Every structure is written in structure tokens, then in C-alpha cells.
């Protein structure tokens, strides 16, 4: 059925006013929704920018706290975000190695330590972390090999406390002539302390240390190296 609108109703002032009010409401509603949409978009944009501008140090410090609390999965999640912000952060990979080591996922731990070494070949604690992982995987020879590398780095960096600690670990892990060599090196070290001279480290085999640090790509060692790194440099238990 077709309805016909009488011409007089179109010209009726009441109808005109009603139509005007409806049009005005629609306009106001559209305006409100437009403002709401703009507000939502703005908030999203601000949050994205806050995340983008958040310093990677915030993630690293949070990961350390979570690791110390035993929340290893939480630490790993945070470190993945840190790596998302800076894929060249050797500290993030090192801390990831620590978290996986505490989870007893030694293969994943080694993978992350090696990535940290690739970015910073002078990060002695990463070599030490790998040595610990191989020890817990019952691969003593590989553990000794990586301890040798860590020992060389700590000696070169004059970190003699770590150097001494690794020597004691090597003595505990070794047998026969190799054990005697490490014992002699430790005795020479103790003697050097008494005489205030620098000991010469004993090498039981070929130790290859990567010295090219060009892969750091502008990352400052000073900014990252002094972190409280959780893996302790003490004889393995």
C-alpha cells in the first residue's frame, strides 16, 4: 500500500520543527561519536609512543627483579620485549641465558649466552654461564673448555677474584697432569699476591677468544656491563 503525504503536512510548521530537531540530534550524536573516536585513537597513539620511548633499562631491571624472585618465565617475557626494542642488547641475551639456566633449560640458555658473546665477545660471565650449563649437562670437557675462555677474559680484564674462582673450579673438575697445572697456576697466583706481581695464566690447550667487537654497532659497554648479573662465579656444586 502506497502512502501519500499531503502537501500541507510538508509545509506544516510542526513537522518542520520536528524534522529540524531530529536532524540536530543526529548531528550532535555524530559529533559525539567523532570526538569519542578521536579520543580513542589519541590514547592508543599515546600508549604506543610511551612504550616506544620507554628505556630498555626499565625492562632489564624488571627482568633482574623477576629472576631474583624466581619468576623466570616472567623475566623471559620482559627480556623478549627488551630485545624487541634493541636486538643488539647483549645484556638482555645474557639475562635471558640466566633465566633459562635457572629453569634448567640448558640448551636454550647456551643459545642465549652465545648470542650475548656474539654481541660482546668480552662478556666473561657469558662464557662462564655456558660452562655451567655444560657441567649440568654432564659434558665436563666442554665445561672446562668454556671455563678456560672465561678465565682468560677475566685475567685480561684484571678481574682477579673471578679468575681465582674459576681456577678453583677447574681444579675441582680436572684430573691428573691438567689438575696439577691448574694447582700450580693457583699457587703462582697466590704467590703473586704476596709479592705484588702479575701471574701468568697457564693454558692447557688452544683457547680462541673473539676480539672483534665491531658487531656491537655503537652499543656502550659502560651502559650495560655493570649490571648485577645473577650467575655466581663460584665452584660448581
Image (cartoon, rainbow, N blue to C red):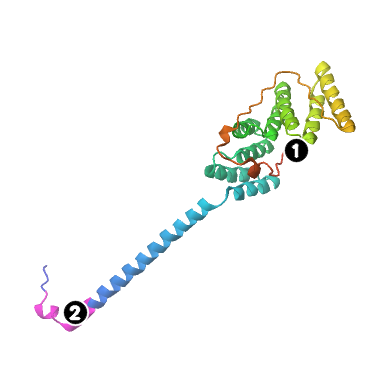
Residue 237 shows in this picture: no
Residue at the outermost top position = 177
Secondary structure of the residue carrying tag 1 is loop
The one of 49 and 160 positioned closer to us in this rendering: 160
Q: Residue furthest bottom?
A: 13
Tell me which residue sits at (66%, 31%) in the image. Answer: 106
Residue 78 in the image, given as x and y percentages of width and height: 59, 46
Image height check: is 139 above or below 18?
above
Provide the secondary structure element on which disc 2 rests. Answer: helix
Q: Give the mark nearer the N terminus: 2 vs 1.
A: 2
Where residue 202 sits in the image (x, y, percent)? 78, 22
Q: Which residue is mark 2?
A: 16
Location of residue 226 by image quarter: top right
> Between tags 2 and 1, which lies in front?
1
Q: Which mark is residue 209?
A: none
Disc 1 designates what residue?
Answer: 232
Q: Is residue 50 left or right of residue 12?
A: right
Name the image quarter holding the N terminus.
bottom left
- Mark 2 is surrounded, within 10 Å at the Cα level, by few (under 14), some (14 to 19) or many (20 or more) other residues, namely few
x then y, percent, for residue 213: 60, 32
- Identified at 66% across, 47% down, the residue is 66
Label 1, residues with CA under 10 Å away: few <14, some 14-19, many ≥20 = few
Quarter of the image that includes the C terminus: top right
Magenta range is: 5-19
Amino acid at each position: 500500500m502506497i502512502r501519500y503525504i499531503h502537501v500541507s503536512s510538508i509545509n506544516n510548521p510542526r513537522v518542520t520543527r520536528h524534522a529540524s530537531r531530529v536532524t540536530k540530534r543526529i548531528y550532535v550524536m555524530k559529533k559525539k561519536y567523532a570526538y569519542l573516536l578521536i579520543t580513542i585513537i589519541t590514547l592508543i597513539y599515546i600508549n604506543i609512543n610511551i612504550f616506544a620511548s620507554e628505556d630498555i633499562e626499565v625492562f632489564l631491571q624488571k627482568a633482574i627483579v623477576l629472576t631474583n624472585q624466581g619468576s623466570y618465565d616472567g623475566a623471559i617475557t620482559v627480556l623478549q620485549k627488551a630485545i624487541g626494542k634493541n636486538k643488539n642488547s647483549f645484556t638482555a641475551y645474557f639475562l635471558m641465558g640466566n633465566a633459562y639456566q635457572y629453569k634448567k633449560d640448558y640448551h636454550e640458555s647456551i643459545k642465549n649466552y652465545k648470542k650475548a658473546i656474539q654481541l660482546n665477545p668480552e662478556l666473561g660471565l657469558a662464557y662462564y654461564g655456558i660452562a655451567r650449563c655444560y657441567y649440568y649437562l654432564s659434558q665436563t670437557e666442554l665445561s672446562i673448555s668454556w671455563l678456560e675462555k672465561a678465565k682468560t677474559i677475566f685475567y685480561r680484564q684484571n678481574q682477579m677474584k673471578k679468575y681465582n674462582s674459576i681456577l678453583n673450579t677447574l681444579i675441582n673438575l680436572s684430573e691428573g697432569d691438567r689438575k696439577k697445572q691448574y694447582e700450580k697456576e693457583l699457587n703462582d697466583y697466590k704467590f703473586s699476591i704476596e709479592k705484588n706481581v702479575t701471574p701468568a695464566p697457564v693454558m692447557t690447550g688452544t683457547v680462541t677468544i673473539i676480539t672483534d667487537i665491531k658487531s656491537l654497532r655503537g652499543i656502550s659497554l659502560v651502559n650495560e656491563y655493570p649490571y648485577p648479573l645473577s650467575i655466581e662465579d663460584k665452584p660448581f656444586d
